[in-house]
Image: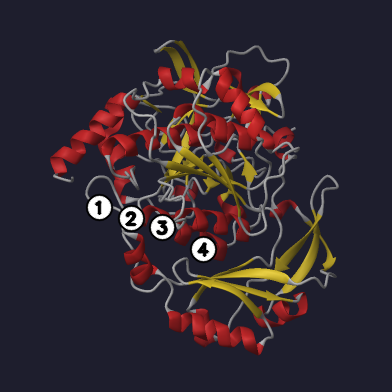
């Protein structure tokens, strides 16, 4: 049995599916056409020198060109497709058509695919959608033809037999020196969920059990037909995310965006959260992902554009780096990193095994329980994204075939299920770990920073890489398979786990030195 088989058999992704034959259904299909942005590429808001772009300015500068939308509209009408919505600021047009109409319009073949282990039959798309030459340059991607899942949640329940230490999120926050002067008030933290459900009574009972009397507001947002559906295994992911953020950013509001686990759903959830002018999140937490090489190139281009929108608007995106070590659960024996954590627009969150009490850490090493088939932190070198300028001096190792690429993760936090988080799911108290816990941990910390600094930190990479080890617990012991921990940045835990107050002080001093106000 491979290190990842037990966990990931629950969460197969599209490339694991078996082709059964042509798609036989006749039900209409809703697709999202992602349009190119007008103008050149926007510059992400980066603490403290580049403040967030105002929404109205973004829409005028970086939304879709109405002329592009008109061209696509004419194409859709030629093929009998119905337009069900268009949002130029988000660069999306929604079209509906029969399978036959869509196959003809986009030059693809729709098939039926069996998910492994007798799972559901899903519609899949063979071939890359094609468009006439006068339109193709206007379109980044056509999403929604393929229903196969693109991501898995990065959480791990503690095996019943394992002897373990466990912590509440409050205890982890104390060990990491989360600043006591801020609780996230005035901030909204968005959470992306591609399955599972949220149970308000569990959250309320959990917060009360921690002695928290003012229960944070939680909004459930339905995206692209996705809904909160409690009762499945992914509830562990949802409640872990909400409870970690609720405990560690008690003054913040929380918005949970539920979308289908498809390329369309994932893109729409990030895009809608980034552009949500009602809830106005300043942080987005993502605990789902899949190996880089499992993504279609056009889907990656669309996802990257949505993440770029987020950071341009000053929204920090945190993402789990994966729970299957340096292979990311692939069976080819090669190194792989997980997407979206490998995006340069995302703060990639790796995992540690943490021991300590009160505010004193007695030990912290790379999370690696592969020998027990209990997972390990993801991390490594991207095969698809170049080395960012802010990572140039981090000594990122060579990737596959000696290539240079974006190093993953950036930061880390407690993730080992054997030192996991006490949470409440389905009316039961449980212990859950995984890098899924680290993305919301950092999201809560960023929300506190935003409140205290009086401005969204946005894309915080350049600042963190400039600050370096002085504001982190540098993890120097352990490995995640192919990569070993080392002094400074490494491909297991990035810079390490946070020294919360020290990091806030360092960010504050950057603001002062830049003259930003």
- The label on residue 7 is none
Q: Which badge, 2 or 4, comes first in the chain's sequence?
A: 2
Q: Which residue is more in the foreground, 223 or 6?
A: 223
Q: Which residue is more in the foreground, 459 or 173?
A: 173
* Contact check, label 2 and label 3, Cβ < 8 Å: yes
Q: Which badge, 1 or 2, comes first in the chain's sequence?
A: 2
- The label on residue 302 is 4
**Disc 1 secondary structure class:** loop
Q: Residue at x 71, y 67 (%)?
A: 125
Q: Residue at x 63, y 59 (%)?
A: 224
Q: Which badge, 1 or 4, comes first in the chain's sequence?
A: 1
* Residue 345 in sight here: yes
Provide the residue designation for mark 2: 44
**Disc 4 secondary structure class:** helix
Between the C-alphas of marks 1 and 4, the distance is 24 Å
Locate the N terminus and report the quarter of the image it occupies: top right
Q: Which residue is more in the foreground, 428 or 336?
A: 428
**Disc 3 secondary structure class:** helix
Between the C-alphas of marks 2 and 4, the distance is 16 Å
In this rendering, would 231 be left or right of 86?
right
* Contact check, label 1 and label 2, Cβ < 8 Å: yes
Provide the residue designation for mark 1: 50
Q: Which badge, 3 or 1, comes first in the chain's sequence?
A: 1
Between the C-alphas of marks 3 and 1, the distance is 14 Å
Q: Which badge, 2 or 3, comes first in the chain's sequence?
A: 2
Front of the two marks 1 and 4 = 1
Residue 63 image offset from top left, x and y in percent: 41, 70
In this rendering, would 156 be left or right of 381?
right
């Amino acid at each position: 049995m491979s290190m990842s088989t037990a966990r990931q058999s629950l969460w197969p992704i599209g490339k694991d599916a078996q082709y059964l034959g042509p798609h036989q259904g006749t039900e209409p299909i809703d697709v999202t056409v992602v349009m190119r942005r007008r103008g050149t590429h926007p510059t992400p808001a980066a603490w403290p020198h580049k403040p967030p772009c105002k929404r109205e300015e973004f829409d005028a500068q970086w939304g879709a060109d109405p002329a592009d939308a008109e061209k696509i509209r004419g194409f859709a009408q030629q093929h009998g497709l119905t337009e069900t919505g268009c949002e130029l600021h988000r660069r999306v047009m929604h079209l509906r058509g029969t399978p036959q109409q869509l196959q003809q319009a986009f030059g693809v073949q729709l098939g039926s695919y069996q998910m492994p282990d007798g799972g559901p039959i899903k519609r899949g798309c063979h071939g890359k959608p094609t468009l006439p030459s006068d339109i193709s340059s206007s379109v980044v991607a056509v999403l929604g033809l393929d229903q196969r899942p693109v991501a898995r949640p990065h959480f791990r329940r503690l095996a019943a037999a394992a002897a373990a230490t466990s912590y509440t999120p409050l205890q982890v926050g104390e060990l990491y020196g989360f600043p006591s002067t801020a609780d996230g008030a005035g901030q909204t933290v968005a959470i992306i969920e591609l399955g599972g459900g949220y149970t308000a009574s569990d959250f309320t009972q959990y917060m009360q059990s921690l002695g928290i009397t003012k229960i944070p507001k939680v909004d459930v947002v339905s995206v692209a037909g996705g809904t909160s559906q409690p009762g499945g295994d992914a509830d562990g992911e949802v409640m872990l995310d909400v409870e970690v953020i609720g405990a560690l950013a008690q003054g913040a509001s929380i918005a949970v965006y539920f979308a289908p686990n498809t390329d369309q759903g994932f893109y729409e959830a990030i895009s809608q959260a980034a552009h949500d002018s009602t809830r106005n999140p300043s942080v987005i937490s993502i605990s789902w992902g899949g190996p880089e090489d499992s993504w279609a190139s056009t889907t990656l281009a669309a996802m990257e554009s949505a993440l770029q929108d987020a950071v341009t608007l000053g929204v920090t995106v945190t993402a789990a780096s994966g729970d299957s070590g340096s292979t990311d659960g692939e069976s080819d024996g090669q190194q792989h990193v997980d997407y979206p954590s490998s995006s340069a627009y995302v703060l990639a969150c790796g995992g540690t095994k943490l021991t300590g009490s009160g505010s004193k850490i007695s030990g912290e090493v790379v999370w690696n329980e592969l020998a027990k088939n209990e997972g390990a932190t993801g991390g490594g070198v991207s095969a698809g994204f170049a080395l960012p300028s802010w990572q140039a001096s981090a000594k990122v190792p060579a990737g596959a075939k000696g290539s240079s690429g974006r190093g993953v993760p950036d930061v880390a936090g407690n993730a080992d299920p054997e030192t996991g988080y006490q949470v409440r799911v389905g009316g039961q108290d449980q212990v859950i770990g995984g890098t899924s816990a680290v993305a919301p941990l950092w999201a809560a910390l960023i929300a506190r920073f935003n409140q205290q600094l009086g401005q969204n930190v946005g894309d915080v990479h350049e600042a963190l890489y400039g600050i370096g080890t002085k504001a982190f617990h540098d993890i120097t012991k352990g490995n995640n398979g192919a990569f070993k921990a080392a002094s400074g940045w490494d491909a297991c835990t990035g810079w390490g786990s946070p020294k919360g107050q020290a990091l806030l002080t360092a960010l504050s001093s950057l603001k002062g030195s830049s003259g930003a106000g």
